[in-house]
Each structure stands twice: as C-alpha cells, then as structure tokens.
Image: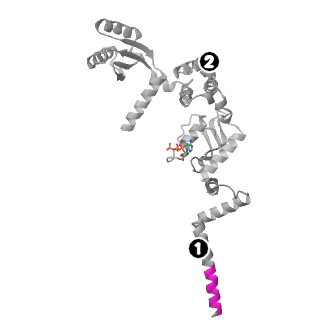
Amino acid sequence: MASVLTIMILEWILFLLLSFYLDHFGSFQSGIRKAVLLLHSRRAGNRSQSAQQQTTQIQEFEASVEMERTDVIKEREMVGQLLQEPNSSYSVICDNLKKVYPGKDGNSKKIAVRELSLSMARGQCFGVLGPNGAGKTTLINMLTGFTKPTSGTAYIEGMDISLLWENLTGREHLMFYGRLKKLKGAKLAQAIEQSLKSVRLFDGGVPDKLVQKYSGGMKRRLSVAISLIGDPKLKTKYGGSYVLTITTMAAEEAEEEVAKLVRSISPAVSRVYRISGTQRFEMPKQEVSISAVFHVMEDAKSRMTILAWGLSDTTLEDVFIRVAKENEASSVI
Ligand SMILES: Nc1ncnc2c1ncn2[C@@H]1O[C@H](COP(=O)(O)OP(=O)(O)OP(=O)(O)O)[C@@H](O)[C@H]1O
C-alpha cells in the first residue's frame, strides 16, 4: 500500500511539472527552442532585454535551427567557391545577404532577408518567387542600392555593392553602370549626359550631388536612368517612334479632325493620350519621314486653329508609359 502511495505522489509531482512546462512554453518543439533560447540569452547576460528583442532573437534562432535544404546548401557552397576563385561567367553573387528592419511602434524588428547566398550566371534569366512579405523587394532594393544590407554583401560584375550608393553622386552611379555595359571615354560621357537629361537630373548641379541628398523621386528617376544607360534594347523595342504633340481648342470636333490628319501620315499612328485639346501621338520611325510631318502640319495650320505642336524623339517617359500600358493590357487579358 505504501509503495502504491509513493508511486501516486511521484506521478503527481511529475505531471505537475509537465503541465507547468507545457503551460509556460507551449508545444514540445517550440518549447524546447524557447527554453534553449531563454537559457542562451540568460547566459549572455541579457536579462534586461525587452520582449521586442527577444522576439527577434527567437526568429533568428528558429531560422538557424531550421534544416537548410540541400539545394540551398549547394548554392551556398558554390558561392563560397566563387568568392575564392572568381569566375567571370557569374555577374551577380550574393554572399550571406541579410536585412533586418528596425522595429517601429512597439513592433519587433523584422528580418526581411536571411543570409541569402546565391549566384547568377551572366545572361541567365533569374526569377525571384515568394509569397507577400518574403523579402523579394528588399533583395532587389539591396542589389540596386536602395537599401543597405544589415550584413553580408553582393558583388555585381565583381564589384562590391557595399562600397557604393549613398556616398556616390548621380553621375558616378551612371559611370559605374555605364562601364559595366562596356561604355568608355566620350561614349560613356555622352550616354551619362543623355540619361541625366532624359530623367531631368541634369541641371542645377544635381548630377554631382551625393545620392544621399536626393529626394525619393530623384532616386527613382536615377534608377530609371541606370536601368537604361548604355543598353537601350528596352528603349529601342518600345521607343523606335516619333512623338507628335498637337494642341487645338478642347472641342471634340477639332480633336477628331487632328486625329484624322495625323492618321493620314501613317496608318500605324497611335494616340497616347488626349487631354483638354492636347493630343499626343506615336509614329513608327520607319514609316514616317520628318519632312512629311512638317508638310502635313503646315497644311493643317492653314486650314484650322492649331494652338501649338511639336515633334520629338521618344523620351524615357514615353517608353515608360508604353510599357506600363502594355503590362496593364496583358494583366487585364
Ligand atoms: N521599410 C521597412 N520597414 C520595416 N519593415 C519592412 C520595410 N520594408 C519591408 N518590410 C517588411 O519586410 C518584409 C519583406 O518585405 P518585402 O517588401 O521585401 O517583401 P516582398 O516579398 O517583396 O513582398 P510583396 O510580394 O508583397 O511585394 C515584410 O514583412 C515587410 O513588411
């Protein structure tokens, strides 16, 4: 009888401890993680750290104990190898790239990108997939210099991104990317000037200001210039056109007459927009001669009221509007 009672008391103590443990730490698996983490943070003398820091540590710790997939391990090894023996057929190499955003309004810090290592071969089309919040934008922003990595770095054509960006001027950025695209000397200088002008960053000493002094909009315009400098394939495909802008009275009849007139120059003309009497048209260069446009416009001016008109080459803005329109159309389909 005494031994039965002893066993019951022991069981009672055991279950009491077990229920206390589960109540405190949740499930077995996460409980073990948290318990180890708490132990770890206590050892490190972090008793006074806030709950916010603890949450971030939990995130990091859980990430580190998760088993890495074999392809991820292989990629990491590959990057290690490439960093030791540089290979020019890889144009982008990310080496343990990490981004942690600081916590705001009582929220904990956010690990957006966790020690990402990967290599992209030159000419390779590389897709980044992931659910909302997976860190795709943050990765691209780090690679394009809009966000500074918290740790780790990336090499683009062998150049370390952590040495760039905020302490360079707009002109220096374009010089860097122009050189990546094999432009040199006068051609490079010309391409830089053109790019800066096309995104309206040329005047007022703006090209020689540090990018850290640029506003958000100026940075975005610089990134458009960067993406197009030296390799205008994006621009040639969408930009092999003249742009004709004509302003008449804002009356349907006058506007339609102008549209008819412009279509007589080339059937492939397309109207970009029509706003209060101002219409913008695009005409494929191979089908239109500048002299024909002048001829038609002079004739039109003698017959109707043309308040203003102008002919120009496609600007980056036109290219952007066209690409955005095509995207919009394909997403509707
Ligand atoms: N500036 C910021 N400050 C704090 N947290 C941020 C900031 N930018 C992004 N985050 C957070 O970092 C995580 C990754 O965001 P990111 O925008 O990189 O994801 P994404 O994969 O591009 O998402 P989506 O597919 O929705 O565009 C998200 O949880 C997001 O809330």
What secondary structure characterizes most of the magenta part? helix
Q: Secondary structure at mark 1?
A: helix
- Tell me where residue 62 appears, x and y as whole percent: 62, 57
224 is within the stretch colored magenta: no
Residue 251 placement, left or right of 138: left
Q: Quadrant of residue 146?
A: top right
Tag 1: amino acid: Ser
Reply above or below: 147 against 32: above
- Tell me where residue 8 appears, x and y as whole percent: 61, 86
Reply above or below: 115 against 204: below
Reply above or below: 268 against 292: below
**Residue 121 seen:** no
Q: Which mark is residue 56?
A: none
User: In front: 85, or 21?
Assistant: 21
Quarter of the picture containing the C terminus is top left
| Magenta stretch, residue numbers | 2-13
Furthest toward the bottom, the residue is 1
Tag 2: amino acid: Ala
Quarter of the picture containing the N terminus is bottom right
**Residue 5 seen:** yes
Q: Which residue is mark 2?
A: 189
Q: Which residue is mark 1?
A: 19
Label 1 within 8 A of ligand 1 by Cβ = no
- Tell me where residue 116 appears, x and y as whole percent: 62, 45
User: Tag 2 or tag 1, which sits nearer the N-term?
Assistant: 1
